[in-house]
Amino acid sequence: MIRPIYVYGHTVLRKKAKDISKEEDVKKLASDMFETMYSASGVGLAGPQIGLGKRIFVIDGGAMDEELDGFKKVFINAQILEEEGKEWIFEEGCLSIPQIRGEVSRKPTIKIRYYDENWELHEESFDGIAARIIQHEYDHIEGILFTDYLSPLRKQLLKGKLDKISKGKITADYRVTLPKK
Ligand code: NI
């Protein structure tokens, strides 16, 4: 089932998300999240983006980079354990912030511990674009948005556009839920 995507201005995007208990039907939830993400042509989607303050995000990097073909995963109750290397810049976007992109600097290598949709525990390292997508989605479950990292000047330039989104003046070619006034 496709869920509407919560956009900039919703408080759920700004809260640290809570762990999911093993009784919850994470398979159904993950399947809805993938369906929602694909319908919006995204490569990642986190719980808060569908209004759910839970520590889950899904990723399928195949549409973004050939090297990421098959990089399709569900991350539940994830914790980033380490981030290292020399920071590199990449232009990011976000389904919750339509039509805005910005350069974000992040470390290239991460180690992360998470459960998959079968409640199997993993501890893995990722680098490059794969790490980048994970870091962006992980930020969502910590209440952080990529625009938080932009330079003061860039933030100033985008302020008007962000205010418009939070007032519901946006166009997106997928279903969104606007912030309440
Ligand atoms: Ni995002």
Image (cartoon, rainbow, N blue to C red):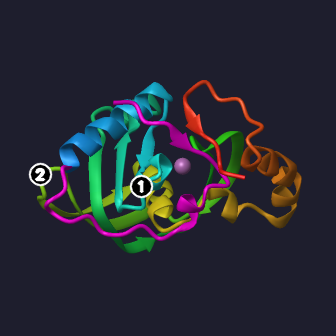
Q: Where does residue 9 sit, x and y in percent of width and height?
A: 67, 55
Task: Magenta stretch: give its range.
Answer: 1-25
Q: Main secondary structure of the magenta part?
A: loop
Q: Is mark 2 within 8 Å of ligand 1?
A: no
- To which quarter of the image does residue 99 belong? top right
Q: In the rendered structure, find residue 118 and report the number of the disc placed on it.
A: 2
Describe the element under mark 1 as helix, strand or loop: loop
Residue visible at 49% across and 36% down in the picture = 4
Relative image position of residue 96 (x, y in whole percent): 59, 45
Q: Position of residue 70 (x, y in %)?
A: 27, 34
Residue 58: where, in percent of width, then height?
A: 35, 46
Query: Which quadrant of the figure contains the N terminus?
Result: top left
Q: Nearer the viewer, residue 80 or 66?
A: 80
| Amino acid type assigned to the residue bearing label 1 in the image | Leu
Q: Left or right of 37: which side holds 13?
A: right
Residue marked by disc 1: 52
For the residue marked with disc 2, what is the amino acid? Asn
Spatial CA span between label 2 and label 1 = 20 Å
Are there few (<14), some (14-19), or many (20+) residues within 10 Å of tag 1?
some
N-terminal label among 2 and 1: 1
